[in-house]
């Protein structure tokens, strides 16, 4: 049995469903294939869930910061029920580099973020438990996003616009054999062969393995990071340590909990990697430097996520990069196959738009992107989004404490 479509998207995380939604809204016939039993099972569902303002990247990559700020505002419009408008603080502790703090603050101003400078007393008014070592800080428009609600609302919009979503659909081979029709043929485990004019590889940390099925190379450098969820009610804003990127530099409010993150350790196999106790201990210890009560807080759960980093970008940045920009890669051995790697949850819609622009250009589809203007299905209704998250099997460890 063979199923024909125009575009296949491989991967059911935020980027994959975002690409499927964008293409479907432009009138393209799309089939999304996800190997797991539900959506949001990879990087998206195992993130710390920060809706970035762009402040984290402002001094190192102004363009990425501007993009974050723009997408932050867009997601608040199209999916408000998936967003907690928590706000964010960047804080400098005694011993942290004041020059770095000043550069970060000025860079935030330069990209149009309008940060609010705060002294130690003002910071303690906003976060009463903050450490005595905190000397200064500034407020930025960070937020918290529920990956489950965001992915589920996007997936419902995919379906609303006529595309199909298949879970438990593991792709085992991609034949780019240069037939006269120039269509790609995908073999699906225990399923039909699917043929398409184009294939979008949005498999995150597994993107290199997907590309290899088509005889193409895609250098990936995935890194793991631990998140530690502890009981800590009424945190308030997202708390960021204002220093060069390091372990344990962010605390994220999640209802009655706080999620502490994170580490960055390279992994060879995204399906089999170590989970080390020292990562948990270091993350808690470093975050407790900002909020001392975290040192004795009750741990509810720990989970590891994988960053789908593109190796050439990471090598250029010397290892632990801070940009987290995305890349779109064409593959000469497999015409019609496009891979999208890197990026961050906040910019998933923009990543999808860029991919859809590329694919539509190749297919000769002349239709504009409308995903920034049209709300997600259920985007203003948290109960509806929770219902959709359960339907699509999209509830992951990132927000299992939030989604009802």
Image (cartoon, rainbow, N blue to C red):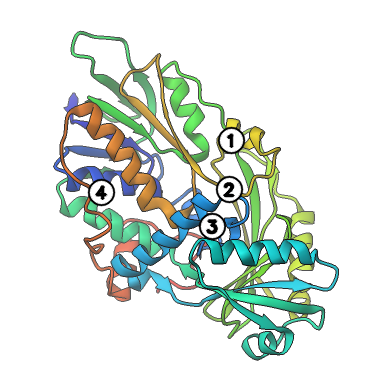
Instruction: Give the SS element for disc 1.
Output: helix
Q: Earlier in the sequence, mark 3 or mark 4?
A: 4
Is the residue 41 above or below the residue 301 in the image?
above
Residue 264 point in image, percent of width and height:
69, 48
**Sequence-earlier tag: 3 or 2:** 3
Against 181, residue 61 (above or below) is below
Pair 3/2: label in front: 2
Considering depth in this image, is 110 or 33 the residue closer to the camera? 110
Give the farthest residue toward the right. 95
Residue 21: mark: 4
Q: Residue at x 75, y 55 (%)?
A: 279
**Is the residue under label 1 in contact with that under label 3 (CB below 8 Å)?**
no
Q: CB under 8 Å between callouts 1 and 4?
A: no
Residue 54 vertical placement versus 321 (above, below): below
Q: Mark 2 = which residue? A: 323
Q: Which residue is mark 1?
A: 313
Label 3 sits on a secondary structure element that is loop
Residue at 70%, 73% (x, y): give it: 91
Q: Is residue 212 above or below residue 110?
A: above
- Distance from the alpha carbon under mark 2 to that under mark 4: 26 Å
Q: Nearer the viewer, mark 1 or mark 4?
A: 1
Residue 81, horizontal then vertical, whole percent: 34, 73
Query: Do labels 1 and 2 touch, CB within 8 Å?
Result: yes
- In percent of width and height, residue 161 lies at 16, 50
Q: Which mark is residue 228?
A: none
The mark closer to the camera, 2 or 4, is: 2
Q: Which label was assigned to residue 47?
A: 3
């Amino acid at each position: 049995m063979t199923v024909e479509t125009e575009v296949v998207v491989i991967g059911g995380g935020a980027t994959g469903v975002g690409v499927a939604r964008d293409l479907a809204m432009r009138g393209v016939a799309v089939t999304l294939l996800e190997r797991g039993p539900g959506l949001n099972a990879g990087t998206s569902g195992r993130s710390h869930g920060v809706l970035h303002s762009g402040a984290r990247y402002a001094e190192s990559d102004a363009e990425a910061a501007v993009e974050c700020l723009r997408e932050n505002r867009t997601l608040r419009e199209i999916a408000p029920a998936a967003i907690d408008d928590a706000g964010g603080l960047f804080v400098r502790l005694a011993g942290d580099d004041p020059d770095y703090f000043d550069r970060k603050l000025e860079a935030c101003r330069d990209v149009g973020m309008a940060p609010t400078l705060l002294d130690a007393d003002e910071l303690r008014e906003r976060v009463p438990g903050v450490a005595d070592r905190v000397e200064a800080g500034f407020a930025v428009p960070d937020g918290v996003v529920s990956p489950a609600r965001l992915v589920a609302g996007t997936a419902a919009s995919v379906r609303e616009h006529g595309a199909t979503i298949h879970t438990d659909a593991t792709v085992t081979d991609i034949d780019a054999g240069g037939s006269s029709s120039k269509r790609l043929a995908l073999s699906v485990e225990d399923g039909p062969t699917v043929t398409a004019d184009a294939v979008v590889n949005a498999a995150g940390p597994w993107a290199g393995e997907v590309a290899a099925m088509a005889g193409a190379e895609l250098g990936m450098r995935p890194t793991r990071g631990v998140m530690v969820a502890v009981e800590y009610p009424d945190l308030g804003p997202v708390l960021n340590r204002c220093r060069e990127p390091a372990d344990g530099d962010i605390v994220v409010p999640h209802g009655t909990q706080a999620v502490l993150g994170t580490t960055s350790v390279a992994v060879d196999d995204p399906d089999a990697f170590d989970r080390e106790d020292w990562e948990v201990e270091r993350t808690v210890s470093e975050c407790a430097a900002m909020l001392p009560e975290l040192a004795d807080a009750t741990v509810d759960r720990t989970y590891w996520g994988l960053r789908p980093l593109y190796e050439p970008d990471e090598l250029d940045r010397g290892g632990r990069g801070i940009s987290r920009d995305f890349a779109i890669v064409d593959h000469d051995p497999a015409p019609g196959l496009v891979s999208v790697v890197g990026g961050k949850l906040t910019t998933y819609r923009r990543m999808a738009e860029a991919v859809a622009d590329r694919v539509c250009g190749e297919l000769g589809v002349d239709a504009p992107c409308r995903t920034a203007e049209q709300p997600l299905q259920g985007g203003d209704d948290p109960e509806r989004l929770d219902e959709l998250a359960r339907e699509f099997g999209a509830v992951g460890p990132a927000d299992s404490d939030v989604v009802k």
